[in-house]
Image (cartoon, helix red, strand yellow):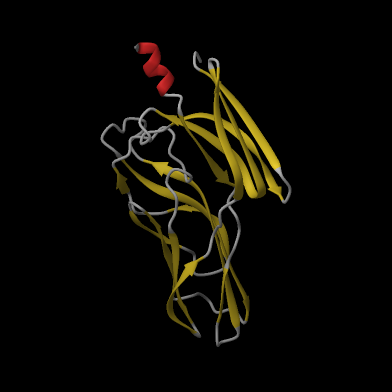
Amino acid sequence: MKNQIFKLTLTIFFISFFALPSKSQIIVTSTDGYSVEITITPTSLHIYGGDNCKNGYNYDINFDYTVKLTGDIPSKLYTLQGTFETANGSMFFNLPNKTASGSSRTNGHVWTSKTDCKTADLQSTPIAKITIEIEGPGIKSQFIEYKFSTLPIELISFKAKKENSSVQLSWATATEINNDYFTIERSSNGIDFISVKNIKGAGNSNQLNTYTYSKSDIE
C-alpha cells in the first residue's frame, strides 16, 4: 500500500514558466512642454519572518525603477507614486519626483495564508496590476495603469507518460518571449504543489522548441 500511495504522488505534474522582467513604460506629456517617462520592473518578493510560515506570512515586492523628465523640466513633480496589486491586497510605493533611477520596495506588508515562504516568487505570487498616480505642472492629477508584461510562451503540447519506474514529461512551445525557465512541480492532491526541477527556457524564440524530463519513482 505504501508503494501504491507513493506512485500516486507522481501522477499529477504541472509545469509553469518564469519570464525575465519585460520592460515597458508610461509616458506622460505636460502642457508645460516636458514629458515624464516611467519604467517599473518587478524583481522579487521580500518575505518577512524567515522560513517559519506554517500559519502564513507577510510580503512586499522589490522593484527597479527609472523616472526620466525631458524637455522644459520643472524643479519637481507634485506627486509620483503607485500601487502593486496581487490577490492578497495592494502595496503602496513612492517614486522620486524628478529624474532618477534605482531600486525600491513596496510598503504594504500584505498577508497570505500560503505556507510556501521558502520558494515563493513572482511566479507563484503574480502581480495583477500596477497603477501609477502622477501630478505636476501642466499634468492634472491622474491614475494610469501600467502595462508591464504578457504571457511569455505559447505552449502547444504537454504530455506525461509513465514508463516502468519513471514518469516521462515532454512539452513544446511555438514562441517564447524573455522566458528564463520552466518549473516542474508535482502534487499528491492537485492543490499543494512542490517544485521538482527548473528547466532552462529558450529566452526569445519564434521557432519550435521541445523539452523533456524524466522523474524516477525512487528519487
Query: On screen, 22 above or below 16?
Result: below
Q: Quadrant of residue 47?
A: top left
Point out the residue furthest to the left here. 55
Left/right of residue 146 with respect to residue 201 in the rendered view = left
**Observer-nearest residue: 128 or 80?**
128
**Observer-nearest residue: 2 or 48?**
2
Query: Which residue is rendered at x = 45% and y = 27% of the image?
Result: 11
Query: Which residue is rendered at x = 62% and y = 42% of the image?
Result: 180
Which quadrant: the N terminus? top left
Residue 53: x and y, percent?
31, 33
**Observer-nearest residue: 102 or 42?**
42
Query: Which residue is rendered at x = 60% and y = 46% of the image?
Result: 155
Query: Which residue is rendered at x = 64% and y = 49% of the image?
Result: 178
Residue 215: x and y, percent?
55, 22
Left/right of residue 117 with respect to residue 19 in the rendered view = left
Q: Quadrant of residue 202?
A: top right
Query: On screen, 50 above or below 44?
Result: above
